[in-house]
């Protein structure tokens, strides 16, 4: 899911950079600084998650976890994912420094979208909440795959071809992330429901 | 407490898988052997990059040739000229990797050796033409081992060396690789950075609150 250095053209990189900067600015404004540790923990989880490989299909896919990051953090997913991606680029040579903006948008924007789509259900009954969180994990990866296809439109590759390849390649990941997200939310609901967004206090 | 518990959950979730952890990226690496350049491509995690286009450029960005990786992620070609080369792998879906073969790697390989041997081989024959006193000696040598002259021995040594050094050349090329698989140190380092950032955030948050 990480776009490598040297694939994208300048304007795409620039657009990605600007969007990522805007998202990060909103995220930093919206962070409740008493929960900064939670943002950090999820950034750490995101950072490590991409090391977990699922070698199914022609390519090689790994966990992303942007669904759960988005559900729990909302806009703060942007700074969290930006930090994690920066460290991944430096320490693991995933993606690259120039593609940081595009990659951040690719993974953080779906996280925010899933936050708006699914977080309202998290304080409902268990069954609904868990279904919603499965969907959040699933669709966050799906949206990321589509965004990846869009980013690659401007290079030589064909949008439908690439997007469908990425979607198919990451299909097992979508299922796994859905399950992981559902499991996490189910657990947090029992142990610490106040972590989940939407609880009126 | 909340944060601690959350941390523990994440910890348990991921250390279980950390044993099988690999970095996710695509790499290609290339080395020169005789008159051929060999390349190997793989996704980290060990999966070979199959059927992916590989392009070869010279140092000025001029495209020399292109090809595709086979089922083992390998692609090899006879190099057309001795220049530094840039090997570019397109693994699709935004994955791309590059490897540079400096011109020095082509020295002492393939073409130049053949040039040398022919040049060296030319000297004795020229000598033979000039001075007849050398003839009996070489004739004696020939009678001792009729099949072996300097050229043959050189070729034999070259071939044997190529064969024996093959794995070493490959490993040496691999050592030049600036990239590496993610290690435990990298993972801990990254997590450490993030914890440090949390600390900085918490510090400023605390200071702000105290002022209020």
Image: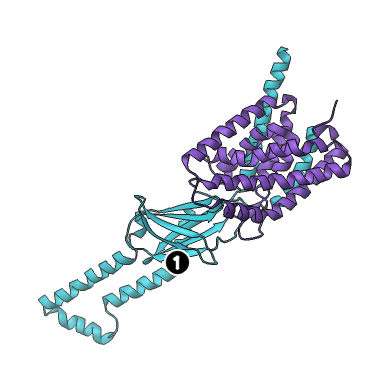
At 47% across and 43% down in the image, what residue appears? A9
Q: Quadrant of the C terminus of chain B?
A: top right
Q: Position of residue B147 (x, y in %)?
A: 29, 84
The chain coloured cyan is: B
Q: Tell me residue A134's x, y (percent).
A: 78, 46
Q: Secondary structure at mark 1?
A: helix
Which x, y percent locates residue B1?
82, 32
Q: Which residue is identified by label 1? A: B166
Q: Could you tell whether A103 is left or right of B86 in the image?
A: right
Q: Residue drawn at (56%, 42%), measured in percent from left and top?
A: A89
Q: Which chain is purple?
A: A
- The image quadrant of residue B203 is top right
Quadrant location of residue A109?
A: top right
Q: Residue at x 78, y 49 (%)?
A: A179
The answer to whether residue B172 is seen in the rendering is no
- Between A92 and A72, which is closer to the camera in this rendering? A72
Q: Chain of mark 1?
A: B
Q: Identify which residue, B100 or B33, lies in the foreground.
A: B100
Measured as percent of width and height from the top left, residue A72 is found at: 75, 36
Q: Is residue A62 above or below residue A27?
A: below
Q: How is the image coloured?
A: by chain
The residue carrying pointer 1 sits among few (fewer than 14), some (14 to 19) or many (20 or more) residues within 10 Å by Cα, namely some
């Amino acid at each position: 899911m990480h776009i490598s250095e040297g694939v994208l053209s300048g304007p795409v990189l620039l657009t990605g950079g600007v969007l990522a900067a805007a998202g990060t600015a909103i995220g930093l404004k919206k962070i409740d600084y008493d929960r900064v540790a939670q943002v950090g923990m999820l950034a750490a989880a995101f950072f490590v998650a991409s090391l977990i490989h699922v070698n199914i299909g022609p390519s090689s896919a790994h966990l992303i976890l942007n669904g759960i990051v988005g559900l729990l953090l909302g806009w703060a997913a942007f700074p969290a994912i930006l930090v994690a991606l920066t460290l991944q680029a430096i320490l693991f040579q995933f993606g690259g420094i120039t593609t940081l903006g595009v990659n951040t948008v690719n993974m953080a924007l779906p996280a925010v979208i899933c936050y708006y789509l699914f977080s309202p259900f998290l304080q409902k009954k268990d069954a609904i909440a868990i279904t919603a969180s499965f969907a959040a994990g699933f669709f966050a990866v799906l949206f990321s795959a589509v965004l990846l296809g869009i980013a690659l439109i401007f290079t030589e590759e064909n949008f439908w071809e690439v997007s469908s390849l990425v979607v198919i390649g990451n299909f097992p990941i979508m299922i796994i992330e859905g399950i992981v997200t559902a499991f996490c939310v189910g657990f947090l609901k029992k142990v610490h429901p106040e972590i989940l967004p939407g609880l009126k206090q | 407490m909340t944060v601690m518990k959350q941390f523990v959950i994440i910890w348990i979730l991921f250390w279980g898988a950390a044993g099988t952890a690999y970095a996710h990226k695509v790499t290609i690496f290339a080395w020169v052997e005789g008159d051929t350049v060999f390349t190997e491509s793989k996704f980290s995690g060990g999966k070979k990059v199959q059927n992916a286009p590989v392009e070869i450029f010279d140092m000025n960005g001029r495209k020399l040739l292109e090809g595709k990786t086979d089922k083992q992620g390998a692609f090899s070609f006879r190099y057309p000229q001795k220049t530094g080369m840039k090997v570019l792998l397109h693994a699709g879906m935004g994955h791309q990797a590059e490897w540079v073969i400096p011109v020095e790697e082509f020295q002492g390989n393939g073409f130049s050796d053949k040039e040398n041997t022919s040049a060296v081989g030319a000297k004795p024959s020229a000598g033979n033409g000039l001075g007849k006193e050398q003839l009996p000696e070489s004739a004696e040598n020939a009678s001792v081992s009729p099949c072996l002259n300097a050229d043959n021995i050189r070729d034999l040594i070259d071939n044997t060396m190529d064969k024996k050094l093959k794995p070493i050349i490959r490993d040496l090329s691999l050592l030049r690789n600036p990239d590496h698989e993610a290690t435990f140190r990298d993972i801990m380092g990254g997590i450490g950075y993030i914890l440090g950032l949390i600390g900085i955030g918490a510090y400023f948050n605390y200071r702000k609150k105290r002022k209020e």
